Image (cartoon, rainbow, N blue to C red):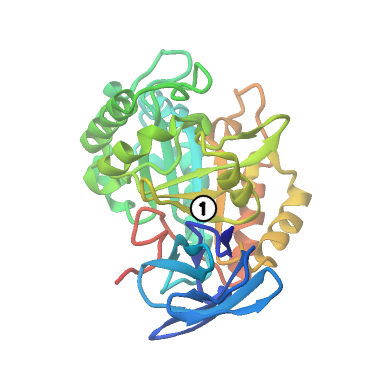
């Protein structure tokens, strides 16, 4: 057997993973070779210690093939992987909010002059005013009760949405909150049809500049075979939990166990059959007590594998006093998470811009 064990196929590398300069990033490729004989990695002769080998290799492209070759008495064997170089990486965070529909219904019911007279949008505006936070607001086509849908949104506030489109983005999440896992076994055509339905309405009532391509699908469960078509439609990033519960990985988009296991401990992975990037969410604010937020994020930023990009998530319904599971300190939880990251030098980004919010060549 000849196997590259580091980096993992699809790993996203940045300056924390090696020595970086304008010409590239030099990393140590590691692996196992069961048979005796020289191993060459991208043209560099590897050092061997028993079955283990390593070689310092410089990568200088966005997507980099890494090829280990061994000639031995049985012939030539080879193992190929690909790693992505996040050349312009910097400390950044993304904040997404799932399950949105109530704030839109509230706008229609109360008809405020300003969208920021809305309880929920006012909170997001306060976070933006204090920290320059950007939000990806992931919307249902209709409310869970079915008493409101996006076709009922007037264009009265279109200019206000456009005036704030640099930090407040609306996108598709699902048709409705229910049933659970609505796309777990759905065709790509069904997923794209629901996406198109929401995009059409957001363009109409909030403007094209307010729209962003989705990065989270409701419940985070789909058939992996749909990924190439979703990529073709414009989806570049999908965020999930990738945490093992009982016999399976939860909110994992149907990825195989080796990829899920990798993502459980590493933030990012490129699914090269489709080119979609998967991101593990660092903190779900509505399920994390306020006193646990900083320790949780401290662990994330202390990890070289996870520190560069922090993926935050919460859910709209917990902001609303009428909701059965209303969280009274929800705004304070947001403030605690965002302040901690800001104080530690993290900048807000939107995942659909560049590569996870960073510049690309």
How many numbered discs, if any?
1
Percent across and percent down for residue 306 are: 61, 62
Q: Residues within 10 Å of mark 1 (few under 14, many from 20)?
A: some
Q: Is residue 37 visible?
A: yes
Q: Secondary structure at mark 1?
A: helix
Percent from the top left, x then y, of residue 263? 59, 50
Q: Residue at x 39, y 21 (%)?
A: 142
Residue 290 x, y percent position in the rendering = 74, 48
Near-viewer residue (292 or 328) = 292
The residue at 72%/61% (across/down) is: 299
Is the C terminus in the top left, top right, bottom left or bottom right quadrant?
A: bottom left
Task: Report the residue that reaches farthest toward the front.
Answer: 73
Tell me if 187 is positioned left or right of 155 in this view: right
The answer to whether residue 285 is above or below residue 306 is: above
Residue 41 is situated, as x and y percent measured from the top left of the image, at 48, 74
Task: Specify whether 294 is left or right of 255.
Answer: right
- Name the image quarter holding the N terminus: bottom right
- The answer to whether residue 328 shows anywhere in this view is no
171 on left or right of 240: left
Q: Badge 1 is on which residue? A: 126
Q: In the image, what residue occupies the spot 46% across and 27% down? A: 102
Please tell me which residue is depicted at 40% across the width and 51% down the height of the picture.
272
């Amino acid at each position: 057997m000849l196997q590259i064990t580091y980096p993992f196929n699809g790993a996203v590398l940045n300056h924390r993973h090696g020595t970086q300069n304008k010409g590239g990033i030099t990393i140590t490729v590691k692996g196992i070779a069961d048979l005796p004989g020289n191993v060459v990695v991208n043209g560099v002769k590897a050092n061997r210690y028993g079955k283990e080998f390593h070689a310092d290799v410089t990568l200088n492209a966005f997507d980099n093939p890494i090829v280990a070759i061994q000639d031995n008495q049985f012939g030539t064997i080879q193992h190929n992987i690909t790693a992505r170089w996040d050349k312009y990486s910097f400390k950044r965070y993304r904040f997404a909010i799932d399950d949105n529909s109530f704030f839109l219904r509230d706008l229609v019911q109360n008809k405020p002059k300003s969208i920021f007279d809305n309880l929920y949008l006012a909170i997001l505006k306060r976070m933006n005013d204090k920290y320059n936070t950007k939000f990806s607001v992931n919307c249902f086509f209709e409310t869970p009760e079915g008493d409101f849908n996006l076709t009922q949104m007037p264009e009265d506030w279109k200019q206000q949405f456009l005036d704030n489109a640099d930090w407040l983005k609306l996108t598709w999440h699902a048709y409705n909150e229910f049933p659970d896992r609505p796309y777990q076994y759905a065709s790509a055509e069904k997923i794209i049809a629901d996406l198109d339905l929401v995009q059409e309405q957001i363009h109409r009532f909030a403007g094209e500049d307010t729209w962003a391509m989705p990065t989270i699908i409701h419940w985070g469960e789909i058939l992996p075979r749909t990924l190439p078509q979703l990529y073709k439609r414009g989806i570049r990033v999908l965020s999930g939990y990738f945490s093992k519960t009982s016999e399976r990985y939860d909110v994992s988009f149907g990825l195989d166990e080796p990829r899920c296991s990798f993502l459980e401990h590493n933030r990012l992975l490129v699914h090269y059959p489709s080119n979609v990037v998967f991101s593990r969410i660092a903190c779900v604010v509505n399920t994390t007590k306020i006193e646990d937020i900083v320790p949780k994020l401290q662990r994330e930023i202390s990890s070289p594998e996870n520190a560069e990009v922090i993926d935050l998530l919460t859910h709209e319904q917990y902001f609303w006093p009428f909701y059965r599971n209303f969280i009274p300190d929800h705004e304070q939880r947001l403030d605690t998470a965002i302040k901690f990251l800001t104080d530690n030098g993290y900048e807000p980004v939107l995942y659909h811009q560049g590569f996870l919010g960073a510049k690309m060549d």
